[in-house]
Image (spheres, grey):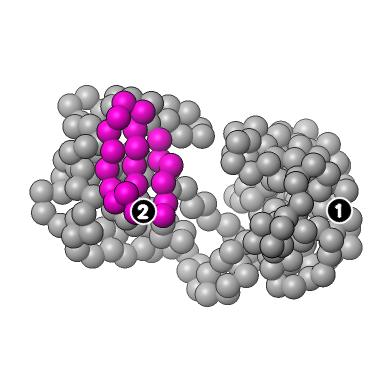
Amino acid sequence: MNYLDQNVPVERLAAAFQQFAAFQSKGHSPLYERLCRGIAQDEALLRLAAHSPRAQPLPNVLLGAVHYLLLKGTPHALAAYYADLSPDPLPPDTPFPLFRAFCQEHQAEIKALLAARRVQTNEVGRCALLLPVFGVIAQRPLALVEVGTSAGLNLLWDRYRYQYSDGQRCGSAQALVRGARAKSADSVVFPGGRVARPPGLKPARSARCRHDAVAARAGVARGQDVIKNRALKRS
């Protein structure tokens, strides 16, 4: 069952894109923020997005479907706004008219992708929550199994660099991935809000961030075979 089959009001469809713009994209992806604000005011695009299964997040699947088609080489001026498709991407000032035109021109392909594909989120900021816990339990190397692993980014928590606002640091200074943030030793802040550190849990500096902290790691996810497709994985 998709959103159309269940007669989800267009106002609720619009709210999903407004929330994605305000809480997921703002400050992180100006392009997606601008696109989502435009989609939220466009009934035709909202009804296109509604071909997604009800369990799927509308903004993720529509934006992912368009990105996937561009990554596959579908020629369109919209590609000039994407950093991974243009060596000198255009500033995201006026991308929406081209986005809307692309969706109109490739409506059948987008509908097919929305109906058949699934998205999984990858958020390394979650590792800021995991780090203090691992610091308590990692008296010896850990064996990690993550269920619903998506691309497996959180399985690599010991490869990242952490810097908390109270001065605590952990991880290699040469780490390429940074930015898991905490406002203090007693809480962790991420785009969705603040999470308190459980009472008695040691602060982040107690965590072992050496490469030998994890002896083995494995991830389990539904439909893992789809990420073998490079364009799908990147979209």
- State how far apart marks 1 and 2 are (Cα): 37 Å
Q: Secondary structure at mark 2?
A: loop
Count the labels in the image. 2
Q: Magenta segment: does it hold 178?
A: yes
Amino acid carrying mark 2 in the image:
Ala
Residue 153, by quadrant, is bottom left
Q: Estimate how packed mark 1 is, as few (under 14), some (14 to 19) or many (20 or more) residues with alpha carbons within 10 Å.
A: some
Evaluate whether residue 51 shows in this view.
no
Where does residue 75 sit, x and y in percent of width and height?
A: 82, 70
Which quarter of the rendering shows the C terminus?
bottom right
Picture coordinates of residue 228, whole percent (x, y):
52, 75
Q: Which mark is residue 218?
A: none
Is residue 120 found left or right of 209 in the rendered image? right
The answer to whether any part of residue 38 appears in the image is: yes
Residue 37 figure quarter: top right
Q: Height in image: 199 above or below 224?
A: above
* Left or right: where 87 falls relative to 187: right
Q: Quadrant of residue 24?
A: top right
Residue 175 is marked as: 2
- Residue type highlighted by circle 1: Leu
Q: Nearer the viewer, mark 1 or mark 2?
A: 2
In percent of width and height, residue 68 lies at 68, 65
Mark seen at residue 98: 1
Is the magenta region chiefly helix, strand or loop? loop
Residue 200 sits inside the magenta stretch? no
Which residue lies at the image location 25% right of the left edge and 36% below the top edge?
204
Residue range (magenta): 161-181
Q: Residue at x 71, y 58 (%)?
A: 88
Secondary structure under the numbered disc 1 in the rendered image: helix
Task: Pick out the residue farthest to the left.
Answer: 139
Mark 1 or mark 2: whose residue is earlier in sequence: 1
